[in-house]
Amino acid sequence: MTRKPSSQELALYQQQLLGALRLDEPEARQDPTGESLVSLIDDRLRGRWRYMFILGGGLALVLLLLGWRSTEPLYRSVANVQVITNRDVIMTALPEHVERNPGKFKITQMELIRSRRVLEEALRDESLKRFSWTSAAGAVERLEHGLIIDSSRNSDLIAIAYEAGDPETAQIATNAVLDAYYDIYGDQGGADLTDRLQRLHELAAKHDRDLRLAREDMQRITARHGTNDLAAIHREKIEMLTALEGQIRATQLIAKRLEEATVTDPAAELPPPPLPTLEQFDARLAELRVARDQEQTEFEIIRRRYREGSAQYRIAEQRANDARAVFEAHYFTVLDQWRRTGGVSLPDGMAAYYEGQTPERLQEEIDGLRVSANELRDELQQMLADMQTLENNRFERERIQGELERTRSRIQNLETERDNITNVVMVAQRGFKPHGPFKDSRKKRAAAGFMGGFIISFSLFYLVGTIDRRTFGARQLRASGSASMKCLGVLPDLGESITDPESSELASHCVHQIRNQIEATRRHDNDGFVIAVSSPFQGDGKTSICMALGWSYAAAGHRTCLVDCDLVGRSLTRQLGLVGEAGVRESVSAHTIDGRICSLPVEHLDALPVGVDPNVGPESLRRAHLTDIFDQLRDRYEVIIVDTGPLLGSLESMPVTASADGVVFSVRRGRSRSRLDECVSRLESVGATCLGVILNCAQRGDVVRYVSEASLLAAEERAHDPAGELDESSIIRVSPNERNALLSAMETSAKTRQTTDDHSLPKAS
């Protein structure tokens, strides 16, 4: 006899349905493409928080210790040096001029304190020598590294500070540098000044002596030549040498012509040369020829214009005759001179000198001229050397004179500033031993190391969560995957608490929530609704979800049928104890389900097992076969829940999901979401509808999101309510060791609920 649901059960189902609708509203409004920072971090670290904190704590402790030991506190000892900057001063280390800028003087002293000479002198201090690092290589660099020289702009004090890892080293190093600086530059001003003045006087005397010698050399050279203007004498001698060389060449030509003329007949005259030759011999002959030709040309013009006997004619004729007579007279004179000189052009007045000379006497003249020319060349060479010496002497005198003036000026300045040289640097305060560290960064580094440990751990696990996208919570299913996929609910990880009534009630409550979620989103019509349950991996609990959903639908009064289409695994058939019964295989062969549906002990719940026909296998299963079977089941049942193999790993899963009205995926906690996304994409490619995904074996924190406090309190009351043993049969037909934890929890919850309902009914009188 069919038992009607009690009023309490109906009220609970309505409350669960409303809760499911309320839970679904924010998800419906949620932007599937948007993801907050908190959600992103929770997605990457879900399931890894504990390990992240464990690793982070270990790294934090290690880095904390390393940060604490990576540095040491620094102690600073400070000494003060006072410089007198209210008067003009000169120090030996300054340039060779008077320093008039007090600020520059103080800066110079600061540079002198940190100079290598001062540091090397400080390392010779006996107090500092007892530290081993002072004798090692790089001691000067180490001393310079810890040395700090500072001064305020409005103060005459220069602070000398040294930082070290212990206060004693800081004090000793500071005083060593202070003493070295004062020994070198502090009280040596007077002695250095006297020494400097002595060297400057010696230098001035040397410049005087060099200048006197240079002047004596100049006077000796000018006395030898009798004048200071050697350049004019040099030009005159060059002109004399040029004239001698021309006279030598002319004499040689005359001698040669005389020899040629006297070889045969000394009295014979030379034949007249061409007119151009005579014109080259005497330039005036050419001028007279030009004048003659011009006058003759003008006479020819006049003769054509005027008649003979006119005044113009007579004047032009007379001028032409005069020009011709002058030319002819000079021609014969030049010809006679040319014959006497043998055709050699001689300067004016030389022709009479060579007249009557013999070749022998001319050769003697030539030899004498050559001797004079050689002597003149020697004089010119000596004069050039003297001129170069005078030029060098002039530059040297100017240089020495400038050096002498600068030296005398430095002497005068130093003597003027003698009283201001000493007592310009004083020790105002020696270095003291610090009582506490000046700088201690151990706490900061330790804190940075502690935080760095957690940051490194967080980064590592965030990277792991980005690469390994396993599912640890329902939020991750809602934030990833296809936009059409949503999280229908979660099922708790029962573990060893399957006999606990409270855990069983919680699991049963989650199943009813999932059923209400499906019912709230699907269309209701007169035909039966086929729900295929699959998973991306084997062992995600899809068979248990099929049986639990069927139990839930049957408890709600829906005519429900469980269909086992997992032709290889057959887990649903084994759990129902229907191994060996006819079922899907036979229905495919006969094209009918008549006589193959098995009744179960639960009201409104039947099952169609996988069957035993060996001729029907996964490779022969087609979509048309399944569509025919599902159409027959729709005529008899309101809800048909189909168990099939993993969508990506079984042959029958794709025809089953393509023939169903909706597909529900089961994902076990800890599984990768990448294959789930691939499953949804494959369903969308064949036009199938994905109803959502169920997270199996979820943690308690995810489960309580789907269960109200009132439901948990009711479950707790029923768990503590004494109940007797029930003899109601179970749909689970396997041994207790083989039973699924979820189905056992559903059965325990049903028994507890039934017991509670029976105790709440009034007894008959």
Image (tube, grey):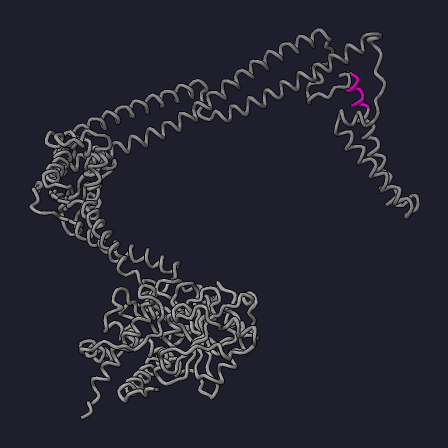
Instruction: Using the rendered image of the protein, determine whether residue 202 is visible from the camera's viewpoint.
Output: yes
Q: Position of residue 391 (x, y in %)?
A: 43, 26
Main secondary structure along the magenta-highlighted residues:
helix
Up-down: is 637 above or below 425? Answer: below
Q: Position of residue 239 (x, y in %)?
A: 59, 23
Left or right: 622 with respect to 454? right
Q: Position of residue 730 (x, y in %)?
A: 33, 74
Q: Residue at x 26, y 26 (%)?
A: 203
Q: Residue at x 50, y 26 (%)?
A: 231
Q: Residue at x 27, y 70 (%)?
A: 701
Range of residues picked out in magenta: 332-339
Check if residue 37 falls in the magenta segment. Answer: no
Nearest the viewer among 463 and 1 is 1
Check if residue 335 falls in the magenta segment. Answer: yes
Up-down: is 429 above or below 462? Answer: above
Could you say which quadrant of the image residue 561 lies in? bottom left
Q: Tell which residue pokes out farthest to the bottom in this image.
A: 765
